[in-house]
Image (tube, grey):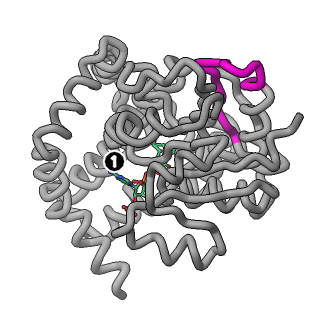
Amino acid sequence: MSAIGQKITFFGFGSQGRAQALNARDSGWKVAVYLRPESKRIAEAQKEKITVITDPKKAAQETDIAVLLLPDTEQPEFYKNFLEPTLPKKAALVFAHGFNIHFKQIMPRSDLDCLLVAPALQGDGLRKNYLEKEPVPILTAIDQDATDRAYRLVEDLAGAIGGEKTHIIPTTFKEETETDLFSEQAISCGGLTGLIKAGFDTMVEAGYNPDIAYFCALKEMKALMDVIYQHGIQGMRSRISDTARYGDLTRGPRVIDKEAREKMKTILDEIRSGKFKEELLEEKKAGWPVLRRRLAEEENHLIEKVRKKIDEQ
Ligand SMILES: NC(=O)c1ccc[n+]([C@@H]2O[C@H](COP(=O)([O-])OP(=O)(O)OC[C@H]3O[C@@H](n4cnc5c(N)ncnc54)[C@H](OP(=O)(O)O)[C@@H]3O)[C@@H](O)[C@H]2O)c1
């Protein structure tokens, strides 16, 4: 039996919450959203004609499927206080990232189905692809199948969130958590921003115009990334000049050299051993001092000043 017709509640209406709730609604599901009473996003959800519930226990009591889309570090306390005592028996608890299950920050009640439906896209991209009927890759896994319906449910849910062209990729909570953390730390967020800034700094320190350095180090990334996304790395190489191709293949390995690869392995080890998780939870407990300091430092970097100047022109 399809899960459409059951009541699904998205806890949170941020990047993922908004996209997932709207996609599920447009796929014909009975959708509600929980937001805290002071949330500035209530009006936005109501404008989309989505039912908003601001009492967390009421939201939990009234749902068949609870999709927990609060920030990962906020989820454990929220689950303990509101979901564990109130979710109906045999409800489903759904995550978009495996962190709290894999690292045992949340131990779901044994009567609940516990599922992972993790889009490999940011919220805006998830909504855009859904509307444009573009393929949406979704990683799925099952931690608990208390009702014998978890396999069907995970597929139905992925289809509701990803639309017609959902590309389901089966995984485990462990694999999704470790690869996602590694990817955002070493590649897509930390690695990428580090590469852009190091390239920009090198050009500026050598005396080049910061505006030119900004375009070379940052803006040009998008065009290349679009080609790689569509045609792969070798496909990109077949579309660039022979000069660029030769520079790529002979200089690229000197930038990401043996030492850089060793550092990647250390970062992955820290994730797998739980060292990163401990550090993150301590940082949250202390009120995010490192995060605040590092964000302020980055705000003062020349590349941000160049960006603001160019965007204002
Ligand atoms: N961002 C992504 O692209 C992405 C991709 C894949 C998976 N995920 C996963 O999706 C989940 C949600 O991440 P997100 O990036 O979508 O989060 P987000 O944009 O930061 O949104 C968080 C939502 O939770 C609410 N919230 C925050 N703290 C709360 C609290 N203590 N009590 C009640 N409500 C609270 C916020 O409401 P207010 O309006 O009140 O602030 C907001 O609606 C995470 O598990 C994340 O790992 C995210």
Q: In which quadrant of the rendered image does the N terminus lie?
A: top right
The residue lying at 28 percent from left, 25 percent from top is 277
Front residue of this view, candidates 86 and 119: 86
Q: Is 145 included in the stretch rendered in magenta?
A: yes
Q: In terms of secondary structure, where does tag 1 sit?
A: helix
Which residue appears at 48% of the width and 24% of the height? 108
Residue 182 lies in what quarter of the image? Answer: top left
Q: Residue at x 73, y 60 (%)?
A: 25
Please report the residue visible at 32 percent of the width from the left and 38 percent of the height from the top.
77
Locate residue 292, reporting x and y percent. Answer: 15, 52
Instruction: In the displayed orientation, state which residue is furthest to the right.
Output: 1
Q: Which residue is mark 1?
A: 193
Left or right of residue 152, residue 20 in this image: left
The amino acid type of the residue labelled 1 equals Thr
Q: Position of residue 267 (x, y in %)?
A: 30, 21
* Residue 285 among magenta residues: no
Q: Which residues are magenta?
A: 137-151
